[in-house]
Image: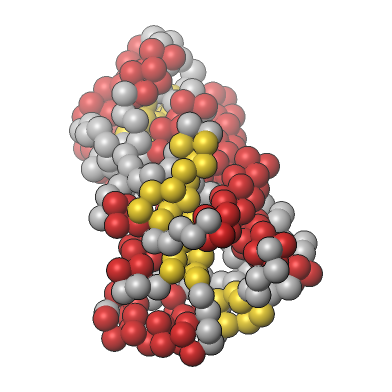
């Protein structure tokens, strides 16, 4: 997100505009927490994860009174337009502000990669690589000790991180919210790897999958012989959201942040900027609100064939 904050700030300053950062997302809009941003204020942040501006979940913003407070703060300060960097919750908020007549452009930033109107969101590639590093490390013990490991990674209701990390990490089985699998079926896939003489087996499980690590462990406790291997579980949780962003994310955030300023300069309002098939596109926020973009579960077959 920092690379996007930097790109928005410097892209706007380059056009001679004045820029303010809002602290803690919508909470700062409500609380009137604005601070002027100059080029040097966003120096040295491109390599840091998270956001120097701070972020917060803000349920008050979902209420009309909260939004009126935010709008009145924006107008009082003479702000012409707002760039909202965030995922589905943030962009639903942008759509509400756009409906109420304020000029907003959204920038897709969520490790979940579930935003409609954009192929890959800021943060997602780094989260995939952190998950992949964990898979690679777990394989060491799995192979030496002839064990199975189930790794749970984040993604809310979208299996994109699990799917990509699972394919890249050579997982024996991947469980996604987009494609249901029962604990018995998952255990059978691990058992199958055991029968084929594999020294280890890895299951990558998206946090939103119905068959989560909890369900799998329950099944394993009641059917210890069902897998062949000993089974261990690792939940990565917020680890996948931390650390330094990779090059792909820094470049993506820079392109999208600059694209948001270009969109505003072209007179566009009420849109999300995105990159679709490597082209910068804009999609009306009204089309995005309430929609999600699922992971492509047809790739599970590719993962299955590669695990033979
Ligand atoms: O939307 C990003 C995300 O990291 C999801 O993958 C995860 O389910 C959720 O946020 C965790 O939210 P919190 O940090 O509020 O616990």
Left or right of residue 132: residue 207 = left
Image point (27%, 81%), residue name: 64
Front residue (pair 304, 57): 57
Query: How far from the left and from the top, in percent, is residue 189?
Result: 31, 21
Is residue 161 visible to us here?
no
Quadrant into which the C terminus falls: top left
- Residue drawn at the location 25% of the way across and 32% of the way down: 179
Q: Is residue 233 left or right of residue 215?
A: right
- Most extreme residue toward the bottom is 76
Q: Nearer the viewer, residue 84 or 241?
A: 84
What x and y, as percent, mark residue 138?
54, 35
257 on left or right of 75:
right
Residue 103 location in percent, x, y? 43, 69
Quarter holding residue 160: top left
Of the 4 image quadrants, the one containing the N terminus is: bottom right
* Image mark count: 0
Outermost residue, front direction? Answer: 267
Where is residue 102? Give x, y as percent.
40, 73
For the point 22% across and 34% down, which residue is it? 180
Taking 137 as reference, is 19 above or below it?
below
Quarter assignment of residue 247: top right
Residue 140 visible, this orientation: yes
Q: Residue placed at 31% from the left, 39% from the top?
A: 294
Task: Examine the rendered structure and indicate whether residue 252 appears above or below residue 278.
Answer: below
Q: How is the image coloured?
A: secondary structure
């Amino acid at each position: 997100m920092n690379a996007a904050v930097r790109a928005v700030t410097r892209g706007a300053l380059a056009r001679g505009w004045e820029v303010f950062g809002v602290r803690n997302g919508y909470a700062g809009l409500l609380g009137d927490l604005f601070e002027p941003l100059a080029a040097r204020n966003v120096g040295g942040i491109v390599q840091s994860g998270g956001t120097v501006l701070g972020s917060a979940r803000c349920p008050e913003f979902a209420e009309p009174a909260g939004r009126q407070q935010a709008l009145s703060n924006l107008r009082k300060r003479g702000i012409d337009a707002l760039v909202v960097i965030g995922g589905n919750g943030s962009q639903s908020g942008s759509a509400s502000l756009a409906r109420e007549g304020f000029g907003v452009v959204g920038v897709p930033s969520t490790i979940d990669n579930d935003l409609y109107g954009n192929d890959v969101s800021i943060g997602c590639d780094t989260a995939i690589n952190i998950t992949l590093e964990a898979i690679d490390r777990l394989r060491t013990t799995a192979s030496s000790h002839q064990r199975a490991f189930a790794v749970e990674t984040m993604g809310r209701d979208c299996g994109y991180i699990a799917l990509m990390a699972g394919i890249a990490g050579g997982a024996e089985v991947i469980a996604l919210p987009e494609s249901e699998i029962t604990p018995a079926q998952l255990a059978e896939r691990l058992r199958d790897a055991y029968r084929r003489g594999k020294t280890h087996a890895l299951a990558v499980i998206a946090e939103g999958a119905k068959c989560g690590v909890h369900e799998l462990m329950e099944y394993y406790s009641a059917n210890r012989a069902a897998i062949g291997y000993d089974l261990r579980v690792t939940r990565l949780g917020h680890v996948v959201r931390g650390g330094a962003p990779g090059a792909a994310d820094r470049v993506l955030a820079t392109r999208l942040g600059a694209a948001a300023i270009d969109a505003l300069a072209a007179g566009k309002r009420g849109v999300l900027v995105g990159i679709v098939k490597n082209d910068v596109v804009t999609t009306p926020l009204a089309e995005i609100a309430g929609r999600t973009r699922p992971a492509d579960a047809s790739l599970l077959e590719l993962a299955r064939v590669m695990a033979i």
